[in-house]
């Protein structure tokens, strides 16, 4: 007879504080993310110059006290471009997570509750999942042109099926619960059952899933830029910086490695945060993962 | 058993048809004129017209669909805009390096990841477990190309142990093949190892809490056999599943890895096609990779019948 | 029986002052406290208690299988044939497990490894503890499978667990436990998950094997019927402590401790009380109600057809309790769920207030939802853990136009009626025990002011003392609101006490129907007779 943890009585803030102490990695990841978000927001005020300013003279200068991260082959300041790149990366992560979670939630709920549509929807999702995500995105970008919006949509589409499957699985298991049957028996209408009894069960796993989607989206965005199918080259994204620095890698490795490692750090922080949230919000899955 | 296999094979058909429809629709249903987008900003009206007829975009949509499916059934993936060669021929030419890289990666990853996952599950909650899991999260987070460049920087440029670029065929130059494939394999394996380790650990951990594990211990079975005879065999199905699903990640990673190490495989073909705006090649490769993925996963499903006697519908 | 002077060599198991500490966070500090008990060769000692009594922990402590890091024996000794198990090394314990002491578990469905053949699993014991070669092992396994009366052992030895029934799997468990003739067999609720007829067979088998081999048995159960059938001596536990021990007759016929007395008094008698026939108006009728399931199936085959319920006719009057009894798979729950329209019946009619609701679409069904309410089996899953008790109770009334205020008013009255405090309304389900949650579920059903209440195994998951209270509550509300009560159960004792009439179901069909008293006195159908014969503890039933 185990009593489940409740967030109702004691202070939520205190509980999170206690959680941070017991999960130091999650706390560190949270701090890193906050720093990155602040850096992205405050980029113009952090000793940066115009990220697109081409400067012929100091080309490929290694990192130094004057230019912390050095400059690239066009003489652009790498520190500046890294900070502005954070804007793109974080924005893509956020947008893709929001879009794929909300669309996936909608489609998953429909699929889980309308048996007739279910078969069709799930076959389409199986089909979408069989197309390797990066290739699907490459295909979408190459027929619709590379812009920030199309790239974001192209990254969102392959993420949707996983969310749909997750939501559908939850819906199918929750609708078997006696408390849902009891709600049916007392005459609660289907939309209200979905809202009251099913949706609250989807929220914690979806928050966790959202962090993983964001991490994977940031990765895909960089890969697309790196392969030349991402945001237009004039946008200073981390992927574009690396794609351009590739040719001069043997002479000026920092042009690739600095945005690369920043990207890795950002994704790592999001992933670790996701694991922490999972432990906090979804202990049933956490025990298994 | 036979009927299960037949049904599983046939069940791939609807999925393949969906993939074909998605790929078909991708070009036709995007807003604006795809021919203009594919041709690029500097294209002449003549080039755009040529692309339009190459892709069959000037015909009514149902005619386009029937023709396209008909060609697909005959193995015709279209004609490359840039080289004017059949896409299927181009793919055949570039197949070997990608196939080799994928095989070495799958073998290496499974050999590393499954024991690591089992070990982590067995020692769950200890520092061993935590270290393995930290590496797994790192593997998820490290972009393939960043790892690739770090390896090139260290082992190629600094230590000069291994070649940094290119590919040698194992049939003509076995030693060269091994030397040239090591770094790409490690690079590509990273995310795959992370994924398989994580799922292996989770599955084994779940199985370890089952009643029959308690039964095995109540018989006086030693821990090693409890782990391998009872737990791992039951965890095999989810592990095999994730190895199959991971193929999708592997394909995406291969495209990037081949670019980093300059390997003339299918991945390079994609990247060149992106740069040259050669849409038929991209479309053909999406189909080939997706169908490969579907078939591999079908084979894995069929292989389940050997792990788990319950799956015999 | 004075165990203090018995030399250690003549006792198989001797537990002395055993305490098992709980982790610091628990609501008590010991799972088991100062427990002393002894088992002699050829003796079955039953450890009886409700959930949380520490009976299973005792068994795990003997086997050395306590969950690592959570529970640990803190004092006392456990002697197996004179050897102190608490002082033994892990290797030594492993040697003893399976050879000198063996264990069978509650869930035969999950206790066997699904990917190994049952023969391999029995043989595994031989591989671990002996040096027999493969042929000798197989011969021993076959011999053992015959000994536990498994049909066609030559074929079954290569079968996988999922191909066997629950009873057959439990026989396999017994075979692998006894193949090396251990001195001690620990049986942890080995028949609880089985149907009553299978239970009787397994109990008989354990008795037979144990007598033939002189095995000492530590038999853990919550069921006094089983105790009456199988025990030589009985140990009663409560909250980790021994409250009373003695021979079977001492405990059952002359219990001393108030807790034992209460437990025994809570067990419903197999003799139904006389009941006047109910003459109220008919509230519910079904005509040829059927439910057919089609499992599997796809493009190429039609799949298997399962008749979960076949042409069930029943009628139920206001103020009457109709019991539907049967084993698992008999279709009793299917009937209940069809009537509540939680599933759609395949054929037949369900007549409610002069209207056939069997085929009504959801929209027109809604007004009938008030009339029929259901109480489910699992008290832990029948309330939404994220909603307060109050929100759960007022959900129905507010669906039908009552304001939140009025509904809460009604909920407060109902809480008093079901014996809970009104401030329970603002709390969450996890703050209540199983019995309390079942009371809340009853309040939720009553909030709709139904005419018909379906109790689908509503007391099966509860401890016997709690069960008695909930049954009493159900009977009270039936009288108070003149309810028609459809009572689904597998438990004949419960049915005998609460039902006016009975319907016995087997494989989807009603095989017998009549007044409870008549059926118990003079069952007609062979299946009903078999069911009654299998009910554990006949002697016990007559005696109180």
Image (cartoon, grey):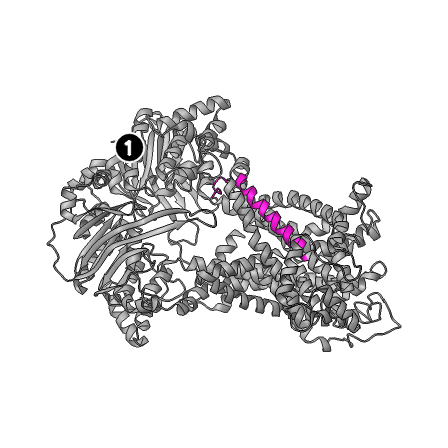
Residue found at the far right of this picture: A57
Q: Quadrant of residue B23?
A: bottom right
Residue B297 lies in the magenta stretch: yes
Looking at the image, residue B117 sits to the left or right of residue C16; the answer is: right
Looking at the image, residue C535 sits to the left or right of residue B162; the answer is: left
Residue B296 lies in the magenta stretch: yes
Q: Confirm whether residue A236 shows in the render.
A: yes
Question: How far across and down, in percent of the image, does residue B141 sit?
Answer: 66, 58
Question: How far across and down, in percent of the image, does residue B10 sit?
Answer: 55, 48
Q: Which residue is mark 1?
A: C204
Q: Confirm whether residue A268 shows in the render.
A: no
In the rendered image, the vertical position of residue B269 relative to residue A151, given as above or below: above
Q: Chain of mark 1?
A: C
Q: Residue at x 15, y 62 (%)?
A: C281
Could you tell me what secondary structure mostly forms the magenta stretch?
helix
Q: Pick the residue in front: C10 or A160.
A: A160
Question: How far across and down, in percent of the image, does residue A100 sit?
Answer: 57, 66
Q: Quadrant of residue C384?
A: bottom left
Question: Magenta span covers which residues?
Answer: B286-313
Question: How far across and down, in percent of the image, does residue C407 sit?
Answer: 29, 73
Q: Quadrant of residue B49?
A: bottom right
In the rendered image, the vertical position of residue A220 relative to residue C527, given as above or below: below
Looking at the image, residue B66 sits to the left or right of residue C70; the answer is: right
Q: Secondary structure at mark 1?
A: helix
């Amino acid at each position: 007879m185990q009593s489940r943890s409740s967030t109702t009585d004691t202070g939520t803030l205190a509980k999170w504080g206690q959680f941070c102490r017991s999960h130091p990695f999650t706390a560190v990841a949270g701090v890193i993310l906050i720093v990155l978000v602040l850096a992205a927001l405050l980029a113009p005020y952090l000793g940066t110059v115009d990220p697109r300013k081409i400067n012929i003279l100091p080309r490929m200068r290694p990192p130094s006290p004057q230019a912390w991260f050095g400059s690239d082959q066009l003489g652009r300041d790498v520190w500046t471009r890294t900070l502005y790149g954070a804007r793109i990366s974080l924005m893509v992560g956020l947008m893709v997570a929001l879009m794929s979670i909300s669309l996936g939630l909608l489609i998953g709920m429909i699929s889980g509750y309308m048996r007739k549509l279910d078969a069709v929807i799930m076959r389409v999702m199986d089909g979408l999942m069989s197309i390797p995500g990066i290739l699907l995105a490459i295909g979408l970008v190459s027929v619709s042109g590379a812009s920030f919006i199309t790239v974001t949509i192209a990254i969102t589409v392959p993420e949707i099926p996983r969310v749909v499957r997750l939501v559908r699985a939850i819906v199918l298991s929750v609708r078997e619960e006696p408390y849902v049957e009891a709600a049916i028996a007392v005459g609660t209408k289907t939309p209200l059952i979905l809202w009251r009894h099913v949706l609250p069960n989807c929220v914690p796993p979806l928050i966790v899933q959202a962090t993983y989607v964001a991490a994977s989206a940031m990765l895909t965005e960089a890969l697309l830029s790196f392969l030349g199918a991402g945001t237009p080259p004039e946008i200073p994204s981390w992927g574009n910086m690396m794609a351009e620095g590739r040719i001069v890698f043997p002479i000026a490795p920092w042009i690739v490695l600095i945005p690369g490692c920043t990207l890795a750090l950002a994704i790592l922080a999001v992933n670790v945060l996701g694991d922490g949230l999972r432990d906090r919000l979804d202990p049933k899955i956490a025990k298994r993962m | 058993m036979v009927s299960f296999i037949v049904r599983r094979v046939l069940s791939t058909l609807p999925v393949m048809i969906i993939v074909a429809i998605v790929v078909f629709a991708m070009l036709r249903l995007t807003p604006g004129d795809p021919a203009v987008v594919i041709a690029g900003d500097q294209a002449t009206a003549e080039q755009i017209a040529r692309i339009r007829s190459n892709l069959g975009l000037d015909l009514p949509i149902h005619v386009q669909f029937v023709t396209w499916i008909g060609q697909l059934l005959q193995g015709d993936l279209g004609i490359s805009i840039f080289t004017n060669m059949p896409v299927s021929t181009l793919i055949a030419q570039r197949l070997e390096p990608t196939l080799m890289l994928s095989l070495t990666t799958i073998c290496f990853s499974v050999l590393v990841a499954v024991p690591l996952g089992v070990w982590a599950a067995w020692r769950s909650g200890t520092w061993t477990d935590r270290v393995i899991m930290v590496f797994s999260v790192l593997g998820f987070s490290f972009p393939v190309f960043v790892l690739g460049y770090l390896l090139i920087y260290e082992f190629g440029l600094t230590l000069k142990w291994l070649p940094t670029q290119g590919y040698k065929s194992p049939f003509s130059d076995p030693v060269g093949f091994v030397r040239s494939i090591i770094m790409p394999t490690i690079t590509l394996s990273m995310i795959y190892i992370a994924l398989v380790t994580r799922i292996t650990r989770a599955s084994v951990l779940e199985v370890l809490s089952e009643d029959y594990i308690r039964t095995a211990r109540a018989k006086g079975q030693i821990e090693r056999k409890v782990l391998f005879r009872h737990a791992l065999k039951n965890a095999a199905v989810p592990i095999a599943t994730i190895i199959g699903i991971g193929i999708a990640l592997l394909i995406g990673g291969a495209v990037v890895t081949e670019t980093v190490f300059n390997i003339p495989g299918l991945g390079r073909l994609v990247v060149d096609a992106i740069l040259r705006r050669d849409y038929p090649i991209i479309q053909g490769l999406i189909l080939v990779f997706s169908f490969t993925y579907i078939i591999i996963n079908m084979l894995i499903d069929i292989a389940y019948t050997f792990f788990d006697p319950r799956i015999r519908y | 029986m004075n165990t203090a002077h018995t030399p250690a060599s003549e006792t198989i198991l001797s537990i002395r002052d055993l305490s098992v500490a709980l982790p610091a966070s628990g609501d008590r500090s010991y799972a088991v406290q100062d427990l002393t008990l002894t088992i002699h060769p050829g003796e079955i000692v039953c450890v009886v208690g409700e959930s949380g009594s520490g009976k299973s922990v005792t068994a795990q402590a003997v086997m050395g299988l306590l969950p690592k890091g959570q529970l640990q024996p803190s004092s006392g000794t456990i002697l197996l044939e004179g050897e102190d198990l608490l002082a033994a090394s892990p290797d030594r314990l492993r040697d003893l497990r399976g050879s000198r002491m063996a264990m069978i578990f509650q869930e035969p469905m999950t206790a066997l490894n699904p990917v190994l053949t049952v023969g391999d699993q029995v043989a595994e014991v031989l591989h671990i503890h002996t040096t027999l070669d493969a042929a000798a092992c197989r011969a021993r396994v076959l011999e053992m499978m015959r000994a536990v009366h498994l049909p066609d052992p030559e074929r079954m030895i290569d079968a996988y667990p999922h191909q066997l029934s629950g009873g057959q799997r439990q026989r396999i468990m017994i075979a692998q436990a006894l193949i090396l003739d251990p001195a001690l067999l620990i049986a942890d609720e080995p028949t609880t998950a089985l149907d009553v007829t299978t239970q009787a067979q397994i109990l008989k088998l354990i008795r037979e094997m144990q007598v033939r081999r002189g095995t000492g048995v530590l038999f853990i159960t919550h069921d006094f019927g089983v105790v009456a059938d199988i025990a030589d001596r009985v140990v009663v536990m409560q909250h980790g402590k021994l409250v009373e021990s003695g021979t079977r007759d001492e405990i059952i016929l002359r219990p001393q401790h108030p807790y034992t007395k209460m437990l025994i008094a809570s067990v419903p008698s197999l003799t139904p009380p006389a009941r006047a026939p109910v003459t109220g108006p008919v509230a519910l009728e079904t005509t040829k109600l059927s439910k057919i399931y089609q499992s599997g199936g796809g493009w190429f085959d039609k799949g298997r057809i399962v008749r979960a319920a076949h042409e069930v006719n029943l009628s139920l009057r206001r103020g009457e309790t109709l019991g539907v009894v049967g084993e698992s798979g008999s279709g009793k729950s299917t009937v209940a769920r069809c009537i509540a329209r939680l599933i759609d019946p395949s054929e037949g009619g369900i007549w409610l207030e002069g209207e056939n609701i069997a085929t009504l679409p959801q929209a027109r069904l809604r007004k009938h939802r008030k009339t029929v309410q259901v109480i489910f089996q699992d008290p832990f899953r029948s309330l939404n853990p994220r909603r307060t008790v109050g929100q759960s109770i007022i959900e129905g009334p507010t669906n039908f136009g009552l304001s939140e205020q009025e509904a809460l008013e009604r909920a407060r009255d109902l809480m008093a009626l079901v014996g809970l405090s009104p401030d329970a309304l603002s709390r969450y389900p996890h703050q209540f025990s199983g019995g309390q949650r079942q009371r809340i579920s009853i309040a939720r059903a009553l909030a709709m002011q139904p005419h018909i209440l379906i109790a689908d195994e509503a007391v099966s998951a509860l401890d016997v003392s709690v069960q008695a209270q909930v049954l009493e509550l159900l009977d009270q509300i039936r009288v108070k609101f003149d309810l028609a009560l459809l009572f689904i159960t597998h438990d004949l004792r419960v049915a005998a006490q609460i039902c006016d009439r009975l319907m016995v179901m087997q494989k989807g069909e009603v095989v017998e129907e009549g007044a409870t008293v008549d059926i118990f006195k003079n069952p007609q159908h062979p299946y009903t007779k078999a069911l009654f014969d299998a009910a554990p503890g006949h002697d016990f039933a007559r005696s109180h």
